Image (cartoon, rainbow, N blue to C red):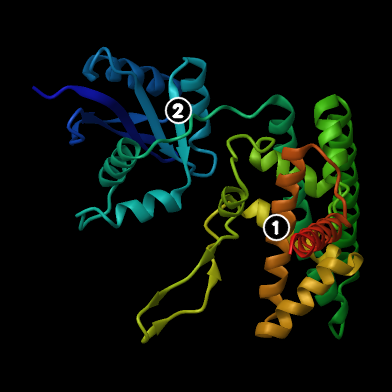
Amino acid sequence: MKKAVKQVAGIDVSQKELVVMLGTMHDDLTQQLHSGKVFPNTSKGYDSLTSWVKKVMVNHIPVRYVMEATGVYHESLAYYLDEQAFEVSIVLPNKISNFARTLDTKTVTDKTASEAIALFGLSRMLEKWSRPTGVYREMRHLTRERNQLIDERTALKNQLHAEKAQAEPCKKAIERVSKRIVLIDKQEKEIKSELSALIKSDEQVKALVSILCTLPGIAMITVCSVLAETNGFDLIRNKRQITSYAGLDIREKQSGTSIKGKPRISKKGNKYLRRSMHMAALTALRSDDKFKSLFIRLVSKHGIKMKAVVAVQRKLLELMYTLYKTNQPYDKNYQDCKTQNSNEKYKSEENLVQIRN
C-alpha cells in the first residue's frame, strides 16, 4: 500500500478568491491531486480554508501552502498562515508558468493554475517563507511610495514642458502643475527623512547600510530599496539567485545552427530591484574607473551600451550581496591585491622549481 510522504496545498490567488488544490506525494514518488475548492480572499475565507484542509489532509503529514507572488493579493493570506504556524512558500510567477508548460494542459484556468502550483510544490524542495521584519516592511512601503512620487513628478514635468511650449500657454494650468511638483518634492524629502530615521532605529541595519554605501554609485536610497525588496537578503543563498530574483539573469535561445536568438535579460523578477540598480549603475559609471573600464570593454565587444549598463547593474548587485555576506566594506583595490598575490605566489613556486633543478 502506498504511503503519503508529502502534502501541498497549491493556491491560485486573485483579488476576490482563492482557488485551492490539495496534492500528495507517495513513497514511490507518484503524485496525486485529490481535493479542490474555492474560498473568498477574506479573513473568514482563510479560516474556512484551513478548516477544510484539516478535514481532507493525511493527519500525520504536515501541509505546505504554496502560492505565487501576485502583487499584494497574496500577502494577507501568507501573514495569516504564518501566524497560525503553517509552512508557507511563495514562488515567483515565472517559475510556475515555466513549470506549467511541461504539463499536459491545454486550457488555462484558475483551477489548472492551482493544480500546477500544487504539482510544483510536490516536485520541488521549496524554501520556507518568513514575513518581512518590521524595519524592512516599513522600508519597502517608503521606497515604493517614493518611486510612485518620482513617476508622478516626471509626468508632471513633461506636462509642464508641453504647456510652456504652446503658442498661447495657460498660466493657471502652469501654476497648478508647478504647485503639484513642489508638493511632490516636499513629500520626497519627508520620505528620505523617514528612511534615515528608520535606519538609525536599528543598529544592525544601520551598520549594514553603512557597509553597502561604500560601493561606488550606491547611496542610501538604493540600499534601502535592495534591502526592502529582499527582506535583508533573507532566503538569498548565492549571487546567481539574487540576479535571478531581480530579473537580471540571461535568457538565451539556441538550437543547432539555424536558431540563435539574441541573449536578453529575463526581466521576470522584482522590477523595483532592477529600477534601483539602473540609476546606481549610471552613477558608478561616472564615478568609478573600474566600472567605466568594464563598460568600455563590453561596448567595444558588442557595441550595445544598454547591454553593458545591465552588466554593471548585475555586477553591483552581486557585490552588494558579497559585502553583506562578508560584512566588510568595499575595497576597490581588492582585485589588484589578489592578482599581485597570485603573481608573487607563481614567482615563488617558479623559483623553488629552479632551485630544485
Which residue is the extreme one toward the left?
1
Is residue 213 shown left or right of residue 57? right
The spot of residue 175 in percent (x, y) is 91, 62
Q: Which residue is drawn at 79% across and 57% down?
A: 345
State whether residue 142 appears in this view: no
Q: Which residue is drawn at 89% across and 29% down?
A: 200
Q: What amino acid type should be assigned to the residue bearing mark 2?
A: Val
Q: Residue at x 67, y 81 (%)?
A: 304
Q: Which mark is residue 168?
A: none
Is residue 339 shown left or right of residue 98? right
Q: How many labels does the image show?
A: 2
Which residue is the extreme one toward the front?
357
The spot of residue 96 in percent (x, y) is 38, 48
Q: Which of 30 and 149 is in front in this view?
A: 30
Q: Nearer the viewer, residue 118 or 142?
A: 118
Q: Which of 289 and 151 is in front in this view?
A: 289
Work out which quarter of the rendered image holds the C terminus and state it.
bottom right
Q: How far apart are marks 1 and 2 (CA)?
A: 28 Å
Is residue 87 shown left or right of residue 234? left
Neighbours of disc 1 within 10 Å: few (<14), some (14-19), many (20+): some
Is residue 239 shown left or right of residue 9? right
* Residue 191 location, quadrant: top right
Q: Name the residue under label 1.
A: 275
Compared to residue 25, the image places residue 252 above or below, namely: below
Q: Is mark 1 on a helix, strand or loop?
A: helix
Q: Which residue is drawn at 68% across and 67% down?
A: 310
Q: Is mark 2 on a helix, strand or loop?
A: strand
Q: Name the residue under label 2.
A: 88
* Residue 226 location, quadrant: top right
The spot of residue 25 in percent (x, y) is 23, 31
The spot of residue 61 in percent (x, y) is 29, 18
